[in-house]
Image (cartoon, grey):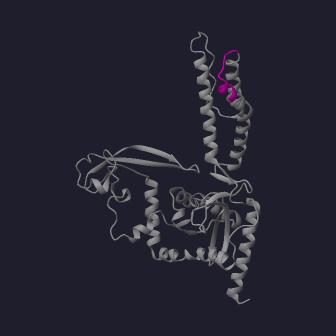
Amino acid sequence: ANRYTFVWGKAIKVSRERIGRQLRELWGYVERVYQDEEQQPNEPNFEAIDPQAVARTIHTINEALKDKEVDPKVRQKLNYAKKNWPQKLAEYDEKEKILRGRNSYSKTDPDATFMRMKEDHMRNWQLKPGYNVQVSTEKQYIINYTLGQTTSDTLLLKDHVNEHILSYGSSPEKLTADAGYGSEENYTFLEEQGIEAFVKYGYFDKEQREKKPNPFHSDNLHYDATRDTLTCPIGQEMSYIGEKQRRTKAGYLQTFRMYQAMNCEGCPMRGPCHKAAGDRIVQRSPNLVRYKQQVRELLESEEGLGKRKQRWQVEAVFGNLKQNKGFRRFYLRGTEKVSIEIGLVAIAHNLQRFGSRTGH
């Protein structure tokens, strides 16, 4: 896909809001015109900003001003709005159907999403249309591949594993992945599938480098299960004050329990512990805490150390494809064709790998 063919989801949202705001300004003009009259026109509905609703609103404004002396600039704006805004909104609707919740797409390849690439020759973080290729390997053979339309690896793990199950008829027994895939949602999914997760969470590597655990991190505060309380670094009890829920982009519902310190004022550890105003409030997901403990034990085991060393195998595969084979961009467009293209590349890689190992 060409690099300067972007359509931005945020730009569409801003344009919709601008039309809604200008409609309200036009109605404000109508109210000023009628301010000295007893009979006031009925206010239109400004909630729906779609082609039909906007066309009705413009018609209502025009009818209200039909026999009135109207500022020429307002009349000109109404004529422009009647002619252009419903059509523009219809175009926005079509673009949002193509976006399907994404932030962007390319006009020359609507399935491609604009992303920051690792290869950035201009060193200006230029966004280019592309796909987020997910690959599973075993002894440097590619055993599964999928295409993602988002930059976040976290959101792509479930579809990737489901594709493996569809292809092989069963789940893998164990899965090794880096911290980009470590989330409560993914840990829950892997547990439901009966897959042992050797998947790092966000700051696992930092934990391993630290000589002492950070006493101020919420995960390191002592938890009393019988009283359902936390203890802050200075020994003060933090009481449970309620729950809150958050839904991820993929629809997973996380539940957080919140705990608040009794009195942080004058605490000698206030600086490194809590910089916001008021007493410190900690939110923690019991599920995520449990998953992190399980993952930590797995990764620190003898088997886990071996699994962590195997992570380079995937990078070796990508290095072979990009550096040795020169495969740095797709030549086809659309997920269906690009999927076939990466499939052919995977077959070629596996055949070469087999040949080099067997001497054929």
Lateral position of residue 53 relative to residue 315, left or right: right
Position in image of residue 87 (x %, y %):
74, 37
| Rendered-image quadrant of the N terminus | bottom right
Please provide the residue range marked out in magenta. 67-76
- Going by the picture, which residue comes out furthest to the front? 72
Residue at left offset 26%, top offset 46%: 263
| Rendered-image quadrant of the C terminus | bottom right
Lateral position of residue 34 relative to residue 256, left or right: right
Position in image of residue 246 (x %, y %):
50, 47
Residue at left offset 46%, top offset 56%: 288
Q: Is residue 8 visible?
A: yes
Position in image of residue 61 (x %, y %):
67, 22
Up/down of 298 relative to 77, above or below: below
Question: Is residue 63 part of the magenta span, yes or no?
Answer: no
Q: Quadrant of residue 154?
A: bottom right
Q: How many marks?
A: 0
- Going by the picture, which residue comes out furthest to the bottom? 359
Residue at left offset 67%, top offset 24%: 72
Q: Nearer the viewer, residue 299 or 110?
A: 110
Q: Quadrant of residue 128?
A: bottom right
Up/down of 331 relative to 23, above or below: below
Q: Quadrant of residue 129?
A: bottom right
Q: Nearer the viewer, residue 289 or 352?
A: 352
